[in-house]
Image (cartoon, rainbow, N blue to C red):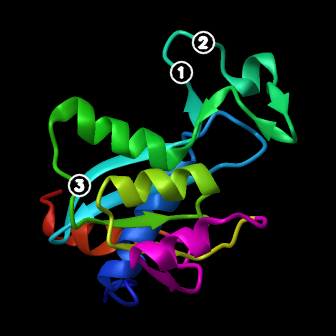
Amino acid sequence: MSSYSKRPSWDEYFLKVAMLVSERATCPRMHCGCVLVKDKQILATGYNGSIPGDDHCEDAGCKVVDNHCIRTIHAEMNAILQCSSHGVNTNGAMAYITNMPCTNCSKSLIAAGIKEIYIFTDYHDTLAEEFFQIAGVKINRLPIPDKIISYDLESFSSVVKK
């Protein structure tokens, strides 16, 4: 009998992917993950990390200005930049993000044509919500998905010849 409990909804699935992506973040001040999705297909992922060739915060320390680490590129920007470098159109896409975007990331998501965001954690006070409202970007606040990955190794083992 399978130990697998329930298949996640699309929203839960993409938020769980964003949670996994956030594990790659290199700034200890915040681990954030972003997944850009269009037509139920992942376009790109991003996490908080340093520019190519620079030290990582976890190795060299954060560069803090006005209580913000400026060493890292935020998850949302990294996902948008990944699309840009691969020629992927983000117009009309959705963003699944572990945290409410900061003000600058909200403006970038709007400019990239993102029409909906899904989050499960708010961020400190930003103008993101105001900008999203002005741009007509829908904010969906969902409960944090189950942190456990339900990989059904038992059923798989029963179909593999021993």
Residue 151 visible in this rendered orientation of the protein: yes
User: Is the residue 54 above or below the residue 57 in the image?
Assistant: above
102 in the magenta segment: no
Q: Earlier in the sequence, mark 1 or mark 3?
A: 1
Residue 20 visible in this rendered orientation of the protein: no
* Residue displayed at 62% across by 56% down: 103
Q: Where is residue 148 in the image (x, y as percent from the top left)?
A: 53, 71
Residue type at mark 3?
Answer: Thr
Asked if the residues shown at circle 2 and circle 1 are in contact, with their CB atoms under 8 angstroms apart, the answer is yes
Dot 2, crowdedness within 10 Å: few (<14), some or many (≥20)? few
Residue at mark 1? 51
127 in the magenta segment: yes
Q: Residue 90 carries which label?
A: 3
- Which residue is situated farthest in the right direction here? 67
User: Mark 1 against mark 3, which lies toward the viewer?
Assistant: 3
Indicate the quadrant where residue 152 lies: bottom left
* Residue displayed at 72% across by 65% down: 123
Q: Element at badge 2?
A: loop
Choose between 125 and 54: the one closer to the eye.
125
Residue type at mark 1?
Answer: Ile
User: Is the residue 49 above or below the residue 89 in the image?
Assistant: above
Q: Where is residue 35 in the image (x, y as percent from the top left)?
A: 38, 57
> In the visual, does 66 lie left or right of 38?
right
Q: Which mark is residue 54?
A: 2
User: Is the residue 122 above or below the residue 79 in the image?
Assistant: below
* Residue displayed at 27% across by 63% down: 37
Asked if the residues shown at circle 3 and circle 2 are in contact, with their CB atoms under 8 angstroms apart, the answer is no
For marks 2 and 1, give the CA distance.
Answer: 6 Å
Dot 1, crowdedness within 10 Å: few (<14), some or many (≥20)? few
- Which residue is situated farthest in the top direction here? 53
Q: For the magenta stretch, what is the residue range?
A: 124-148
Which quadrant is the N terminus positioned in?
bottom left
